[in-house]
Image (cartoon, rainbow, N blue to C red):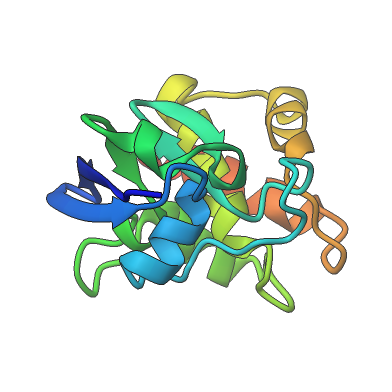
Amino acid sequence: MAKIHVTATINGEEAEFLCEPQQTMLDVLRDELSLTGSKEGCGSGDCGACSIIVDGRLVCSCLMFGAEAAGTDIMTIEGMAQGEKLHPLQQKFLEHAALQCGFCTPGVLVASKALLDRHPNPTEEQARYWLAGNLCRCTGYDKIIEALMDAAAEMRGE
């Protein structure tokens, strides 16, 4: 089967890649583009470990074909920090010890960013609801929510 040529913007830079028609965006990111921050936890869109932002929408990259990326703007965990300067969410996750094994952390951070991009002042209930698709077996979520809410306040200038 012939590979498909795709051009997309990934983390602010134009990217070109070849992919099989059935290849997931997660596999393209990890295997073709060496962006290994997104993790495969389930392969069925149930855990959120592979979360990316596509044209402003939170997407499980294991449920998206790489060919669907043509012409889109994609942000992965690798695109959150600006050089050595961490995104406020990343900094607050460190300060609040909102991670343990780290497997789910990239997806949770990307999902948290997607929430704050849409709702800069979420309630705790909204934050918990938004992150319901991101499973974490280690932290118990409280520190994640605290870090997210603290980052949201900082980003609003409070």
Residue 104 image position (x, y, % from top left): 68, 62
Q: Which residue is drawn at the image coordinates 54% and 34% (left, top)? A: 59
Q: Nearer the viewer, residue 95 or 89?
A: 89
Q: In the shown orientation, is residue 139 left or right of residue 55?
A: right
**Residue occupying image coordinates x 48% and y 39%:** 65
Which part of the image, by quadrant, shows the C terminus? Answer: top left
Q: Position of residue 29 (x, y in %)?
A: 40, 59
Q: Is residue 58 above or below residue 95?
A: above
- Residue 156 visible? The answer is no
Q: Is residue 153 left or right of residue 16?
A: right
Task: Point out residue 2 in the picture as x, y percentages from the top left corner.
Answer: 33, 49
Residue 63 against residue 129 in the figure, above or below? below
Residue in view at x 49 percent, y 50 percent: 23
Total marks in image: 0
Name the one closer to the observer, 45 or 153. Answer: 45
- Of all residues, the one furthest to the front in this rendering is 1
Extreme residue toward the left, this view: 14
Residue 123 visible in the picture = yes
Question: Is 150 placed left or right of 18 in the picture?
Answer: right
Q: Nearer the viewer, residue 88 or 132?
A: 132
Depth check: give the residue in front, 114 or 48. 48
Residue visible at 35% across and 57% down?
Answer: 87
Q: Is residue 47 above or below residue 29?
A: above
Q: Position of residue 47 (x, y in %)?
A: 76, 48
